[in-house]
Image (spheres, helix red, strand yellow):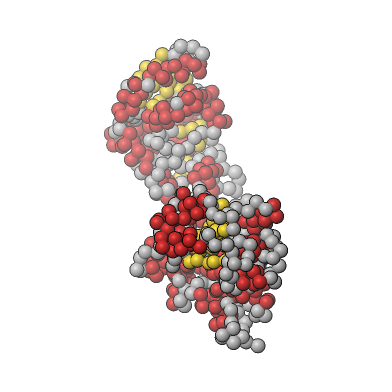
Amino acid sequence: MAASPASHLVLARKWRPERFEELVGQEHVTRTLMAALRSGRIAHAFLFTGIRGVGKTTAARILARCLNCELGPTPEPCGKCAACVEIRGSGALDTVEIDGATYRKIDDARAIIENLSYRPARDRFKIYIIDEAHQLTDQAFNALLKTLEEPPLHVKFILATTEPQKMPETILSRLQRYDFRRIPFATILARLRQLAEREQMAVDDAALTLIAREAGGSMRDAERMLETAIAALDGNVTEAEVAAILGVASRSRVIQVAEAILDKDAAKALLAVRELHQGGANLEALGRDILEVLRNIATARLPGSDGPQSPLADLPDQEAAALRQLATKAGLRDLMRLFHLMAEAQEQLMRSPFADLILEMTVVRMASLAPVMDADELLKAIAAGGGSGGSTPSGGSPTKPLRKGLADAGSPPPTSTTTATSDSTEKTASAPATGPLRAAFETVSAGLPKTTTRIPLRGELKVDRASPEPALSEPSNVVPDLPDLREFIRSRRAALAGFMEQGAVLRLDDASLTVTPRNDIYVRYLSDNRAVIADLASELYGRRIKVEIGPTDAAATLQPQPAAAASTATSRGDSPAALTKLSESVDQVTVATANQGNQIGRTAAETREALYADPVVRRIFNEFEARLVEVRADPSRTSADAKK
């Protein structure tokens, strides 16, 4: 039977908690107050703080009943005596509730002070409950200072506020403070289920979940939204109907938007957003929901996402399973990029008059983003065969890993050159430059077995050989590159090591260390730190090392070593035909290098331009938005280079 309009009470008032045990979500406060009531150590003034609808005023009324109950002071009021009944109905003579927003002036504070001298008419204490206490004026607070510090023994003050930072510190220091927390999602959901059963209303669990999520930790807001849904629908309450009434998007529709974004279906994502907007969904709330879904998807990719503290723990099992399935469609880096874009758009939504256009174009942009390829994955793809010219296993292609990596990053696969050697084995070499130098390099690479090229960075172009052999033209006591010294300097002087890695070539000849700048811009810095380099080198090698700054030679790293290649081929015992072919190739390299040197010049800037002209290198740096990626050799590679 429906209640008459005159006797109807909203859920928040009808089912207001009457004992501390019924006050959900604030166990840390109720436990402390009940312990104080049992021990008799009851303060004279309390301050309850927290967001709206978390139980501050309700707790104040329960505390007043505990203090003035006929069985009290007790943590469990009887609820039947005159004091308990009157306080619950806000009609007790000795329990005064004051609205701080209405009675906020100094005259109102003086009226309170004048009434303090009178004893309670019936009850044990005269209790003043001041709601929204931060609304009192500074003059009213000043008038209450002495009273709050030393009130009469029969007086208790309970102040409640949502903004304690607006209250004077002198007032806060005289009150015993209790901070009320946001009520957890699971607690609100359980309370709503209980209220729906008490009202004998059929409400879908998905609808209750939506209401609990939209409440934002406020129990009163959740009860108000449930009251609105029950009054409007008067029957089976579903999620879609509740979403339409509240002006929000259902969680299933938000997940559909996120799925369209991750599937790179911009048209579907745009259509979903437009339908939600036309259906009356609040765009700011929709943007917040998309942010939350992206957060949950990213959380699903993390280890331990099934733990009790995970955001997924509070979600229904069906929704959590859908989010985990979506998490398999994108990497964590892509999800972070999407979240960052949506967070920026959310700030614009809150202040722009064109919120619908901003949100629509944001989801289109998010759905059109190319996936990010991790630098480590790219380098592994290059090392696996995309940037190498080593021998290929039977039936395989060395360019497949790089092709796959670049295809994933949205770039076309690199072009490689295949040349047949004398033993009919195909070897692929990735060309490091363009023009005649590329052709000459490919010819030499075809004649040298087990040759691998490393894509050069930071203005360095170098060919590393898998089977290094010392060049005959190098004296035995000269050690080039010195990776151990570079690593030692990096452990002591990281800035100096980074500068030397970009701008210096090292050569050690017994007790003399030659530091050759790659460009004139490095000369002054290296000269100023010559003593530091000498001290670090002497400490590493255990003998006094003299440091000399060599002449600037930016093109030295581009020059090949014909003599070393020829001597190596001779030492391997290659056939005369192969030696003749190698000799001709070396001559071509020499001529190409000379011609290329006229074009490249001897400056580091022009060297980098020639390097970036290579299609493979250009595609890589374009994909990473022209940002250099620093590649450090692994310890095994460093030790191998040191032995050279």
Q: Nearer the viewer, residue 365 or 483?
A: 365
Of all residues shown, which one is farthest toward the front?
Answer: 118
Expressed as whole percent of the image width and height from the top left, the position of residue 13 reads 59, 73
Residue 213 at least partly seen: no
Look at 50% across and 63% down and name the residue there. Answer: 115
Q: How many numbered marks are there?
A: 0
Residue 43 vs residue 211, the one in the foreground: 43
Residue located 51% across and 72% down the image: 249
The answer to which image quadrant residue 60 occupies is: bottom right
| Residue plotted at (63% across, 53% down) | 42
Residue 536 visible from this viewpoint: yes
Q: Residue at x 55, y 40 (%)?
A: 391
Vertical order, 233 against 457 (above or below):
below
* Residue 415 rendering spot, x and y as whole percentages: 44, 48
Q: Position of residue 183 (x, y in %)?
A: 59, 61
Q: Quadrant of the N terminus?
A: bottom right
Residue 451: image location, x then y, percent: 51, 35
